[in-house]
């Protein structure tokens, strides 16, 4: 299939490469000339604007952009995708944005005669490179069926979560819980260790008891408890604290718009904001445990 791909960053570039590997023809655009050149070297064709990409003979367009403002500019701008896409071309936005913005853009797309899905991902850059992402999809089931084989070249779990915006709703709910649970594990591990329990013994107890969760048994934030997690390598790599802060902000904003309380989510957002202000936004999000530890322990 001839696919347009816009947004070739840390996630978009490996996703686009997997589409090429699966035998699809790609026309790509990014503001970064280097990012486009690297995909062209891998076999894609360059477009010089979103409009040019939309006017190329593509059957489907995927976008992978930083935030809602970029998504709105790329879809709704005068030189954007909607003003130039052929009717019937399926649009898929995989950026993580708030559900309300996703619904707004999908409604505008429908008015232009273009079906649209929101399809944010989890799995990080590792999952993007390995083609094992989870796609949380919002939109019509017929459009989902059309997108499924394409998304399958980039991901392993592809789940329809309901109508437009519901992929984003599932994503913000999950990531809010992840932020809260990581802080919970960091707090509990720090307390138990400060009270004298060996960190590995404590993690073993938690992981076979009622406190167990992904943040404790797969991604434990306490250094020395697990190998092959960011805590074992100075919190480098992984999922950056600033990306977690972005997702917690989306959850709080989405909640505010519908007046749904997210008490712990808002607290988690403030803790990650504090951590970011201290200059640690690039560290993996499990480094939040350093808020609970003395400097000489960190
Ligand atoms: P990134 O900043 O590495 O890449 C974004 C790309 O979009 C850049 O190459 C940038 O040049 C391009 N871009 C920005 N505005 C543009 C425009 N107007 N036209 C064309 N290109 C434009 O970001 P990323 O890490 O690839 O993340 C993309 C999305 O995926 C974000 O919404 C993020 O929250 C989400 N996400 C990221 C991860 C992760 O681990 N990095 C995991 C899951 C979801």
Image (tube, rainbow, N blue to C red):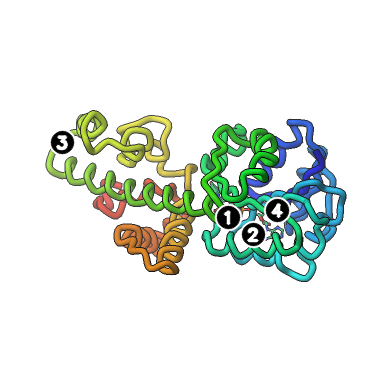
**Tags 1 and 2 in contact by the CB under 8 Å rule?**
yes
Residue 223 locus on image (x, y percent): 32, 38
Image mark for residue 164: 1
Seen at 59% across and 48% down, the residue is 119
| Label 4 vs 2, first from the N-terminus | 2
| Image disc number at residue 106 | 2
First along the sequence among labels 4 and 3: 4
Q: Is residue 222 left or right of residue 12?
A: left
Residue occupying image coordinates x 74% and y 31%? 21
Q: Secondary structure at mark 1?
A: loop
The crowd level at tag 3 (other Cα within 10 Å; few <14, some 14-19, many 20+) is some
Q: Which mark is residue 197?
A: 3
- Disc 4 from disc 2: Cα separation: 7 Å
Ligand 1 contact, mark 1 (Cβ < 8 Å): no
Marks 3 and 2 close (CB-CB < 8 Å): no
Q: Is residue 133 left or right of residue 48?
A: left
Residue labelled with disc 4? 115
Instruction: Tell me where residue 144 sits by quadrant.
Output: top right
In this orientation, does residue 294 appear? Answer: yes
Identify the mark at residue 263; answer none if there is no mark.
none
Q: Residue at x 64, y 63 (%)?
A: 107
Could you tell me how far apart the alpha carbons at marks 4 and 1 are, in whole angstroms?
10 Å
> Residue 245, image x and y in percent?
44, 58
The local crowd at label 1, few if under 14, some if 14 to 19, many if 20 or more residues have their Cα within 10 Å, is: many
Residue 270 visible in the current orientation: no
Residue 15: percent from the left, percent from the top?
66, 41
* Nearest-to-viewer mark from 3 and 2: 2
């Amino acid at each position: 299939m001839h696919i347009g791909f816009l947004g070739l960053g840390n996630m978009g570039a490996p996703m686009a490469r997997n589409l090429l590997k699966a035998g699809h023809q790609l026309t790509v655009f990014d503001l970064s000339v280097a990012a486009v050149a690297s995909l062209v070297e891998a076999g894609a064709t360059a477009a010089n604007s979103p409009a040019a990409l939309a006017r190329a003979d593509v059957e489907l367009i995927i976008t992978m952009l930083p935030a809602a403002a970029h998504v709105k500019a790329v879809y709704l701008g005068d030189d954007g995708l909607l003003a130039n896409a052929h009717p019937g071309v399926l649009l898929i936005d995989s950026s993580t944005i708030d559900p309300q913005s996703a619904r707004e853009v999908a409604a505008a797309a429908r008015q232009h005669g273009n079906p649209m899905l929101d399809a944010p991902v989890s799995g990080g850059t590792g999952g993007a490179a390995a083609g094992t992402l989870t796609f949380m999809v919002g939109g019509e089931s017929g459009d989902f069926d059309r997108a499924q084989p394409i998304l399958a070249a980039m991901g392993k779990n592809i789940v329809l979560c309901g109508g437009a915006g519901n992929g984003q709703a599932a994503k913000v709910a999950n990531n809010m819980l992840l932020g809260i649970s990581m802080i919970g594990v960091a707090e509990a591990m720090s307390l138990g260790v400060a009270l004298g329990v060996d960190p590995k013994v404590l993690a073993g107890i938690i992981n076979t008891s009622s406190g167990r969760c992904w943040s404790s048994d797969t991604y434990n934030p306490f250094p020395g408890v697990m190998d092959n997690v960011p805590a074992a390598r100075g919190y480098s790599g992984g999922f950056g604290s600033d990306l977690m802060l972005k997702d917690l902000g989306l959850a709080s904003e989405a909640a505010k718009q519908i007046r749904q309380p997210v008490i712990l989510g808002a607290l988690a957002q403030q803790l990650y904001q504090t951590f970011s202000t201290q200059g640690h936004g690039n560290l993996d999000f499990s480094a939040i445990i350093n808020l609970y530890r003395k400097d000489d322990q960190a």
